[in-house]
């Protein structure tokens, strides 16, 4: 069963007075591209979390967000780093004395300076094994939720791709009808053209038959039809594989399907056949758009 690369997962965990929230989003991408916004208390665990997530999600543009709220802080307000704030105040006071000027200190502006609203100065950055286990458990739960979302989206992608592949197969069968008329129409057109320009003695009918054979061989699409039918069958076979990660393979098969359809279009030389080829191309474009989102 195929999985989509689009997904969303969220999980929370409690550790003592802290609430840990893990949110993971993913979109389609050619490879695993993870960007993370992690609470400062857990930054030391970022490398392990990245490995944990990418090993399970394989591909996609992944956004990881980890936040922490501590009930021990009044109103869950973010703590002010007093040492950093006082450091800025002392420096500004010293500079004012050197310049011989006195200016009011804007505490609100100082809160925006780096490190002032960072809790690293007031709490330890090291986390215990129990807290790491809680963080890891929440991350895995969020990954599982995202995987379930991907699986659900994958079922929808499966139906869309399978339906359009079957539509191309149906159109391929319809080509047989105008194709049988095409040879007769080509022969008749050539004979009418020769009759208009032929000398009074006529033309060599045996030579005409020989040239007709050469000409018709160039327009023959039986090989293209056979290869296209094989590619369509192989596409459905890959869709039905139980493992996950068929996206790139399906993309390659879609390219081969497009190559055979284009060749048939260039050889068709018949309005009804060209209309069927255009419909095939339209179905294939829809498939290619969906394949880009398959894991």
Image (cartoon, rainbow, N blue to C red):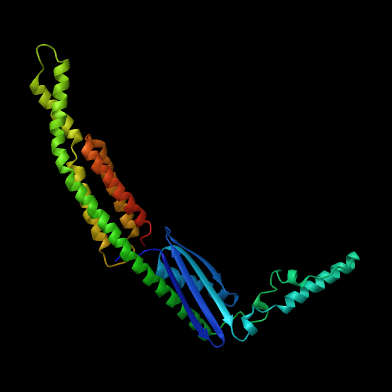
Residue nearest the observer in this picture, 278 or 86: 278
Instruction: Name the residue at 63% across, 83% down.
Output: 75
The quadrant in which the C terminus is found is bottom left
Q: Relative to 7, is 254 on the left or the right? A: left
Name of the residue lying farthest toward the right: 100
Spot occupied by residue 132 in the image (x, y as percentages of width and height): 51, 81
Instruction: Say if 249 sits above or below 223 in the image.
Output: below
Spot occupied by residue 276 in the image (x, y as percentages of width and height): 23, 43
Residue nearest the observer in this picture, 134 or 76: 76
Spot occupied by residue 85 in the image (x, y as percentages of width and height): 75, 75
Instruction: Name the residue at 31% across, 65% down.
Output: 155
The quadrant in which the N terminus is found is bottom left
Residue 185 seen in render: yes
Instruction: Name the residue at 84% across, 71% down.
Output: 93
Instruction: Say if 209 sits above or below 284 in the image.
Output: above
Instruction: Name the residue at 27% across, 48% down.
Output: 257
Name of the residue lying farthest toward the bottom: 16
Instruction: Say if 158 sits above or below 129 in the image.
Output: above
Residue 255 seen in render: no
Q: Relative to 76, is 65 on the left or the right? A: left
């Amino acid at each position: 069963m195929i999985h989509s690369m689009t997904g969303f997962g969220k999980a929370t965990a409690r550790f003592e007075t802290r609430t840990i929230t893990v949110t993971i989003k993913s979109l389609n991408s050619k490879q695993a591209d993870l960007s993370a916004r992690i609470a400062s208390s857990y930054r030391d665990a970022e490398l392990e979390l990245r490995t944990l997530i990418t090993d399970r999600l394989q591909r996609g543009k992944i956004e990881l967000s980890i936040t922490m709220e501590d009930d021990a802080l009044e109103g869950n307000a973010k703590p002010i780093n007093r040492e950093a704030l006082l450091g800025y105040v002392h420096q500004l006071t010293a500079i004012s004395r050197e310049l011989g000027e006195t200016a009011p200190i804007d505490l609100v502006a100082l809160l925006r300076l780096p490190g002032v609203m960072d809790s690293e100065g007031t709490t330890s950055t090291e986390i215990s094994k129990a807290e790491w286990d809680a963080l890891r458990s929440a991350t895995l739960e969020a990954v599982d939720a995202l995987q379930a979302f991907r699986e659900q989206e994958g079922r929808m992608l499966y139906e869309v791709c399978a339906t359009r592949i079957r539509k191309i197969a149906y159109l391929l069968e319809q080509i047989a009808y105008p194709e049988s008329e095409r040879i007769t129409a080509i022969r008749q057109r050539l004979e009418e053209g020769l009759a208009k320009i032929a000398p009074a003695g006529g033309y060599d009918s045996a030579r005409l038959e020989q040239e007709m054979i050469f000409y018709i061989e160039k327009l023959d699409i039986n090989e293209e039809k056979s290869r296209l039918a094989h590619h369509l069958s192989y596409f459905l076979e890959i869709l039905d594989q139980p493992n996950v990660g068929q996206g790139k393979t399906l993309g390659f098969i879609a390219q081969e399907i497009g190559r055979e359809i284009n060749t048939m279009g260039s050889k068709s030389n018949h309005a009804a056949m060209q209309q069927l080829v255009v419909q095939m191309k339209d179905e294939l474009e829809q498939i290619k758009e969906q394949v880009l989102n398959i894991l």
